[in-house]
Amino acid sequence: MTEGKAIVVFFSHAGDNYAVGNIEVGNTKIVADYITEMTGAEQFEIVTHKYDGMAYNPLIKLAKEEARNGELPEYEGDVDLSEYDTVFIGGPVWWGTYPQVMFTFFKKHANDLKGKTVIPFTTHEGSGLANCVEDVEAAFPGAKVTKGFSIYGHEVRSGKAKVEKWLKNIED
């Protein structure tokens, strides 16, 4: 499925979410945990407190403004990607792509994934992968970016088998 050492890099939003209500653990975190459990990959969660406690509608309005303005919100901590051969990159789809905080991560690590396998995944409520695969390809020139995987946010809590099926079908 994956060669060498792997890591799951993701952003997940707990709190008020579309279709699933107020959740303690974000949908993407659940998928990241499934991937970690099934592959033995390590994890790095992109954490920002900018969106903490926001209701869904104001959050989406802010996300749209951030995307339109090309804002790059800060996140906590960081990770050295040099020791990993495979990097899963996941997040929710907000306005056709990943949240802007992920683009902050992408910009910081733009040259760190040359020659590595990058596997995008998303949680969504109708957008599928949207532009996420293309945005990851643009952010990490020289990386081998795979097709990607998407799952409805309202399905993740009962969707472990879908994640497992996807992981078994990833081509090297």
Image: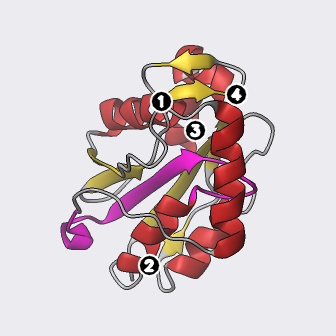
- Asked if 155 appears above or below 151 in the picture, the reply is above
Q: Earlier in the sequence, mark 3 or mark 4?
A: 4
**Which element carries disc 3, helix, strand or loop?**
helix
Q: Earlier in the sequence, mark 1 or mark 3?
A: 1
Residue located at (64% from left, 28% from top): 153
Q: Is residue 109 visible?
A: no
Identify the residue position indicated by label 4 in the image.
18
Label at residue 133: none
Q: Earlier in the sequence, mark 2 or mark 1?
A: 1
How crowded is the residue under tag 1: few (<14 C-alpha within 10 Å), some, or many (20+)? some
- Is residue 91 one of those drawn in magenta? yes
Q: CA distance from mark 3 to mark 2?
A: 28 Å
Q: Mark 3–mark 2 contact, CB under 8 Å? A: no
Identify the residue position indicated by label 2 in the image.
107
Q: Earlier in the sequence, mark 3 or mark 2?
A: 2
Q: Earlier in the sequence, mark 4 or mark 2?
A: 4
Q: CA distance from mark 2 to mark 1?
A: 24 Å
Q: Which residues are magenta?
A: 79-99
